[in-house]
Image: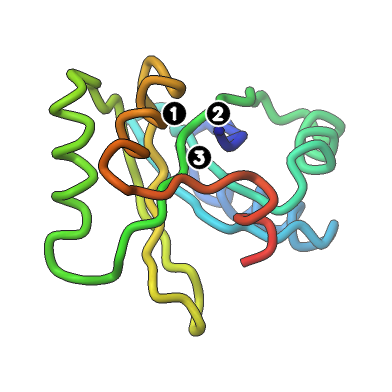
Amino acid sequence: MSLKQISVFLENKPGMMFSVTELLAQNNIDMRALSLAETSEFGIVRLIVDDVYATSTILKDAGFIHNITKVLGVAIPDEPGGLHHVLQALKDADINVEYMYAFLGGKESEHAYMIFRVQDNKAAVAAMAAKGIRCVDQDEIASL
């Protein structure tokens, strides 16, 4: 079980992020999660969206360099220690977290959600399941 994340490579200059969000807004793409990492010259925008194929096509047509990566989405109880419990499961299974970022599930949700990039999604899903931690799929994220 994994999610598809779109990573967009941007020159680090004024208006570049605006150009991406403008393009997505014009095409009715709904962002579910976003992370921005930067260096002095370039940035990487990581997106979880409601329609991966349409977003990828739109970005390509507009000339944005991007790729699609499989990541793990995890529902975390919105309570103290929720993230710690998830990280404990990954640590116990000797799974390294390359990066992660969070987003909320909306007004009706009792969960926060984390996106994890790990080397082996299947092993991470198994480690989570063994500890009673629920992973989410693309359809669930798209419907939030």
How many callouts does the rendering have? Answer: 3
Secondary element under disc 1, as helix, strand or loop, is strand
Q: Which of disc 2 and disc 3 is earlier in sequence?
A: 2
Which amino acid, mark 1?
A: Phe
Q: Which mark, by number, is residue 45?
A: 3
Q: Which residue is mark 2?
A: 9
Give the x, y percent position of residue 82: 21, 59
Secondary element under disc 2, as helix, strand or loop, is strand
Point 33% across, 40% down: residue: 100
Question: In the rendered image, which quarter is residue 75 located in?
Answer: bottom left
Give the x, y percent position of residue 91: 15, 28
Residue 124 in the figure: left or right of residue 32: left
Residue 94 in the figure: left or right of residue 16: left
Secondary element under disc 3, as helix, strand or loop, is strand
Q: Are marks 2 and 1 in contact (CB under 8 Å)?
A: yes
Distance of label 2 from label 1 (alpha carbons): 7 Å
Point 63% across, 26% down: residue: 68
Point 18% across, 18% down: residue: 94
Which amino acid, mark 3?
A: Val
Looking at this rendering, what residue extends furthest in the bottom direction? 107
Give the x, y percent position of residue 90: 22, 31
